[in-house]
C-alpha cells in the first residue's frame, strides 16, 4: 500500500468529503434496502473520522438514474439505514452540489455526518467534469476515497475531484488493496482460482496474470462453454464469445506450460429454457444436445472441483457456476459457496455476484474476505491500474 491513508493526515475539525459506494440493492416493489453490507463495510472509516472530530460529508451514487432526478433512487433511504447503524442522525441534502449543500455543510459540527444526494442525478458525474469536481471540492478540506467498488472508473467524484483537494485512501480501500495484493504477492499454496460467470472477456486479464501463481484453475459458469467450444465440444444453445475462442485456447495452453491444473466441467446440467419450469437433465460434456443449453455444472464436476479446492490453502472465487438466480440451476454455485465457507484456508470472494451469493446464503462471515468490488477486484488482479487509486497521494519513499 503505497498511498497515503486517512490515518496519515490530521482530520480534526476538518470538512472531509468521503466517496463511498452505497449503491445498495433495493427491493423493486417496496424500495427497501435488501442488503446493507456495502454500508457496513465503510463504518471503520466513518467512525474513525467521527472519533477524531471531523465533519463528515459522504457522497455516493445509487442505481442508474442516467443524469436525471429519479425519486425512487433518492439517497434518503441510505441515510436512514446509516443513522440506525451508527446510532446518530445522518443528515441528507436534496442536491449534492450548490447553495443548499454548502449551507448544510456549514452547519455541521465536529463528529456530524451528512450524506449528499445521489451523485448520478448529475450526468457530469460520469463524464470526468472539472466543473462538477470543483463544486464538490468546494464543500470540503480533504477528500477520502473509500469506494473500492467504483475505483476502476474515471468518474468525477473518483478521479477529477482529487485535483482540487488533498486526497487519501479510506480504511476499506486500504483493506481491499492489501488483501487482494497479498493474493498476488504471497499466497499460501496450494492456491486455487475458481472462476464462473458469463464472460471470458471480463476475466482474461485476471486469468493471464494469476496463471503463474495458481496451482489449480477451475472454470465453471457460462464462460466454461467458450472453453468447451474451444476444445471442439458441442455446447448446444449455450451463449459463447466466438471472438474469445482463441483466447480460451491460449489460456489452456498457458496453463499447461505453467503446470497449472486447469479443470473444466466433465458433466453439466442442461435445460430447454431459462425458467423455473424448464426440463433439466445431467449429461456428460460429450453428450450435450444441440437443442439444449448449459445452466449449471453437474454432480461429477462438483465432486472434482471440491476435491481440488479441499487441497488449497488459498482460494479466490469470482463468478457463479450456473444460472444461480433460478433455484434448480443453483446447486453448483451453492455447493461451492458452502465448501469455501468450511475450508481451512484463506478464502477471498471477488465481489459482484459472488459476494451477493455468499451474503444471501449467510456465509459472508465464514469467508476470510468478501470484496466490495467485482469489476475493480478483477482489474486489480489483472495487474491493471485503478484510476481512483492512482489519483491519491503517494507515501514518501
Image: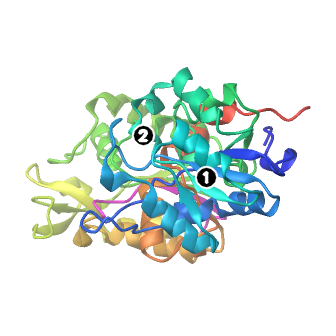
Observer-side mark, 1 or 2, equals: 2
Q: Can residue 258 be seen in this view?
A: no
What is the quadrant of the N terminus in the image? top right
* Closer to us: 296 or 171: 171
Res 122 → quadrant:
top left
Where is residue 306 shown, x and y percent of the image? Answer: 48, 69
How many discs mark residues in the rendered view?
2
- Report which residue position mark 1 lands on: 215
Q: How far apart are marks 1 and 2 (CA)?
A: 42 Å
* Image mark for residue 141: none
- Report which residue position mark 2 lands on: 120
Mark 2 neighbour density, 10 Å: few (under 14) some (14–19) many (20 or more)? many
| For marks 1 and 2 on the same chain, the one whose residue lies earlier in the sequence | 2
Q: Compared to 322, does 214 lie above or below?
A: above
Where is residue 269 shown, x and y percent of the image? Answer: 23, 64
- The stretch in magenta equals 311-324
Q: Can residue 191 be seen in this view?
A: yes
Res 232 → quadrant:
top left
Instruction: Identify the residue at image location x=34%, y=46%.
Output: 223
* Closer to us: 158 or 88: 88
SS class of the residue under badge 2? helix
Amino acid at each position: 500500500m503505497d498511498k497515503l491513508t486517512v490515518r496519515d493526515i490530521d482530520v480534526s475539525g476538518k470538512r472531509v468529503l468521503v466517496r463511498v459506494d452505497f449503491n445498495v440493492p433495493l427491493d423493486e416493489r417496496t424500495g427497501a434496502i435488501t442488503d446493507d453490507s456495502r454500508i457496513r463495510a465503510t463504518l471503520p472509516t466513518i467512525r474513525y473520522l467521527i472519533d477524531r472530530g471531523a465533519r463528515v460529508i459522504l457522497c455516493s451514487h445509487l442505481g442508474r438514474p442516467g443524469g436525471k432526478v429519479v425519486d425512487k433512487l433518492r439517497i434518503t433511504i441510505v441515510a436512514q439505514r446509516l443513522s440506525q447503524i451508527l446510532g446518530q442522525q445522518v443528515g441528507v441534502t436534496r442536491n449534492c452540489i450548490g447553495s443548499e449543500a454548502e449551507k448544510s455543510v456549514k452547519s455541521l459540527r465536529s463528529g456530524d455526518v451528512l450524506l449528499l444526494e445521489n451523485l448520478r442525478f448529475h450526468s457530469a458525474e460520469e463524464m470526468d467534469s472539472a466543473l462538477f469536481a470543483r463544486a464538490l471540492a468546494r464543500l470540503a478540506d480533504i477528500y477520502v476515497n473509500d469506494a473500492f467498488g467504483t475505483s476502476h472508473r474515471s468518474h468525477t467524484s473518483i478521479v477529477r475531484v482529487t485535483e482540487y483537494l488533498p486526497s487519501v485512501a479510506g480504511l476499506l480501500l486500504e483493506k481491499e488493496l492489501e488483501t487482494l495484493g497479498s493474493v498476488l504477492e504471497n499466497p499460501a499454496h496450494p492456491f486455487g482460482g475458481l472462476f464462473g460467470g458469463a464472460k471470458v472477456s471480463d476475466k482474461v486479464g485476471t486469468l493471464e496474470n494469476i496463471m503463474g501463481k495458481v496451482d489449480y484453475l477451475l472454470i465453471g459458469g457460462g464462460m466454461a462453454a467458450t472453453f468447451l467450444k474451444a476444445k471442439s465440444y458441442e455446447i448446444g444453445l449455450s451463449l459463447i464469445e466466438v471472438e474469445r475462442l482463441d483466447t480460451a485456447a491460449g489460456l489452456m495452453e498457458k496453463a499447461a506450460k505453467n503446470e497449472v491444473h486447469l479443470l473444466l466441467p466433465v458433466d453439466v446440467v442442461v435445460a430447454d429454457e431459462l425458467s423455473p419450469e424448464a426440463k433439466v437433465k445431467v449429461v456428460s460434456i460429450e453428450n450435450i444436445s444441440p437443442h439444449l443449453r448449459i445452466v449449471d455444472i453437474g454432480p461429477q464436476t462438483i465432486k472434482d472441483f471440491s476435491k481440488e479446492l479441499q487441497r488449497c490453502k488459498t482460494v479466490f472465487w469470482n463468478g457463479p457456476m450456473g444460472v444461480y438466480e433460478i433455484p434448480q440451476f443453483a446447486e453448483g454455485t451453492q455447493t461451492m459457496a458452502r465448501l469455501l465457507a468450511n475450508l481451512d484456508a484463506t478464502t477471498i470472494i471477488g465481489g459482484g455476484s459472488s459476494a451477493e451469493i455468499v451474503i444471501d446464503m449467510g456465509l459472508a462471515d465464514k469467508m476470510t474476505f468478501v470484496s466490495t468490488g467485482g469489476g475493480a477486484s478483477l482489474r486489480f488482479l489483472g495487474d491493471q491500474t485503478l484510476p481512483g487509486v492512482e489519483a491519491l497521494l503517494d507515501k514518501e519513499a
